[in-house]
Amino acid sequence: MSRNPIFWLRISYLAGASLDGIAGLIMLVPPLFALNNRLTSFSASADFRYAMGMGAPLMLAWTVLLLWADRRPVERRGVLPITVLVILGEVVNEILGVRAGYVLVTALIPTFFIQTLLTLLMAFSYWKSRQMETV
């Protein structure tokens, strides 16, 4: 773990961008959403399509934002704590979905695991990059 802080920033940006791109795709393709959340009797209503249609462009834009941050990794590292806030917002939403009985917690265990790893990676990368002088 003694690699250059820029390495960790870039890994964070690329991991986040990849996962956000996948999430945006899941939001745009209802059968992928059902599969990802293990929803066996899922039917995408007009309300669902509308809500996902609002969220998917934001997810895809965040993908681009992380790729943009990767172009100047140290200078744009402030994107990482903001991204962690987005991840935490997703976790809260998923917990609400479990509490409402919409999705089983067992279906979300892989998602929670990935979100935890990504949050730790981004926090570590941000912390590591603060040890550098302005590049």
Image: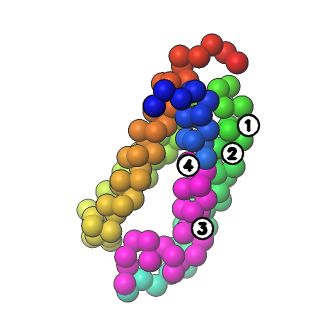
Give the percent coordinates (x, y) of residue 114.
Answer: 41, 53
- Magenta region, residue range: 16-40
CA–CA distance in space, label 1 to label 2 = 7 Å
Query: In terms of secondary structure, what is the magenta stretch mainly?
Result: helix
- Quote the CA–CA distance across marks 4 and 2: 10 Å
Q: Which residue is mark 3?
A: 25
Nearer the observer: mark 3 or 4; the answer is 4
**Numbered badge on residue 67:** 2
The image position of residue 55, as x and y in percent, is 57, 60
Label located before the other in sequence (1 or 4): 4
* Residue 75 visible (yes or no): yes
Q: Amino acid at mark 1?
A: Arg
Query: On the picture, is 86 further left or further right than 102?
Result: right
Q: Which residue is found at the position 68% from the left and 37% from the top? A: 69
| Residue 47 in view of the camera | no
Query: In the image, which disc is placed on residue 71?
Result: 1
The residue wearing badge 4 is: 15
Q: CA distance from mark 3 to mark 2?
A: 17 Å
The amino acid type, in three-letter code, at marker 4 is: Ala
Give the mark nearer the N terminus: 4 vs 2: 4
The N terminus appears in which quarter of the rendering? Answer: top left
**Numbered marks: total:** 4
> Which of the marked residues, 3 or 4, is nearer the chain's N terminus?
4
Q: Are marks 1 and 2 in contact (CB under 8 Å)?
A: yes
